[in-house]
Amino acid sequence: MFTDKEQTLPPPPFGKVGWPWDIRLKPLGSSSPEDLPRISIVTPCLNSAPFIEECIRSVLLQGYPNLEFVIVDGGSTDGTVEIISKYQKFLLYWVSEPDKGQSAAINKGMKKCSGQLVNWLNADDILLPGALHALGTAYELAPDTVLLSPVINVDLETSKSWTTHQSLLFADVVRFWVKPTLTYHQPGIFMSSSLWNQVGGLDEDLHICMDYDLYCKIAPFARLRVVDFTTVEFRRHKGQKTAIMQDLLIIEKSQASKKYWDRSGVTAIDKKNHDNAMAQAIGSSVAGRGLNLFDSLSAIGKLCRGTGISPAPVSAYYVLGLIKNIVRPFVPFRRR
């Protein structure tokens, strides 16, 4: 049985079919809200018209009976507000006004929520069918845990996809340079509201790595539970903030990690490895941007100041990156 709200959702745009356009999910088990933990989801957005409606419908069509959904828009001018307003009666709260950025928007939204289990869902991502039932059931069996669920990543430019499986071991998170591949992925990590409040939510001075900083804060004492159900589709595209603000990503991640070195037992060797990994990341990143020499040196200087890394090893990796970029077209592809 669908709730009245589900039955009266606005129709999808013409030609849109499949999930989450013309498919609805029936509640699993009892449909009584009291029988499952309340889940609160906050979606921050700004000029997200190409994505926001799909995101909204992926949440509202879950068939989950105990849901709070909040949208905090930063003052969009591209039609996002008009799309949100179509669904406003199904939302706990929404607002469109200038703010201090994504972290501030998420914190603002969380203050409106009363759910036991919380997370944010960016406007260009979607929940997969059955996600909230899987999460609610898992949390009911193990209250006050951090739920780690796999996330499928889709590159919208190439249509390639791959799955991220979660780990929040404190040493792995803080020493991110040891395991350069993701060991965590924010859309699939749901935590108790009490834990969120305990650590004070997100650091509003961070604009790219606020999720990384949050997990560094909670990882030492969080009780973890793996949910064997892929809950979110995360989209990669050229307009994404992390794709555009690569410099800030490198700087914030290094700075955030250093805040937790003392309590995580980072050694002198760890610090040396961090510096080498950051030098390689900066040099390779700048080499791949196609900048002239002056702009490249300017970018290297900015990143070195932000991360505290010596320019000498960065310059060496930069030159190495340029050489690789030059010879790569002439190196025959080898099938393994």
Image (spheres, rainbow, N blue to C red):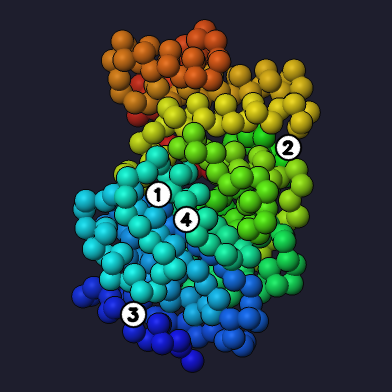
For marks 3 and 2, the one nearer the N-term is 3
In the picture, the disc for residue 236 is 1
C-alpha gap between disc 3 and disc 4 = 22 Å
**Residue at image location 58% in from the left, 40% down from the top:** 212
Residue drawn where x is 55% and y is 57% of the image = 119
The kind of residue tagged 4 is: Gly
* SS under mark 4: helix
Mark positioned earlier in the residue sequence (2 or 1):
2
- Cα separation, mark 1 vs mark 3, equals 28 Å
Label 2: element kind: helix
Marked residue nearer the N-terminal end (1 or 4) = 4
Q: CA distance from mark 2 to mark 1?
A: 27 Å
**Distance between the Cα atoms at labels 3 and 2?**
45 Å
Q: Amino acid at mark 1?
A: Arg
Q: Please give the residue where the numbered disc 3 appears in the rendered image.
A: 9
**Which residue is most to the bottom?**
1
Q: Nearer the viewer, mark 1 or mark 4?
A: 4
Of tags 3 and 4, which is closer to the observer? 4
Residue at figure coordinates x 40%, y 40% from the top left: 100
Image location of residue 321, percent across then percent down:
44, 21
Q: Nearer the viewer, mark 3 or mark 2?
A: 3
Judged from the image, the secondary structure of the residue bearing numbered disc 1 is: strand
Report whether 46 appears left or right of 120. Answer: left
Q: Label 4, on which residue?
A: 109
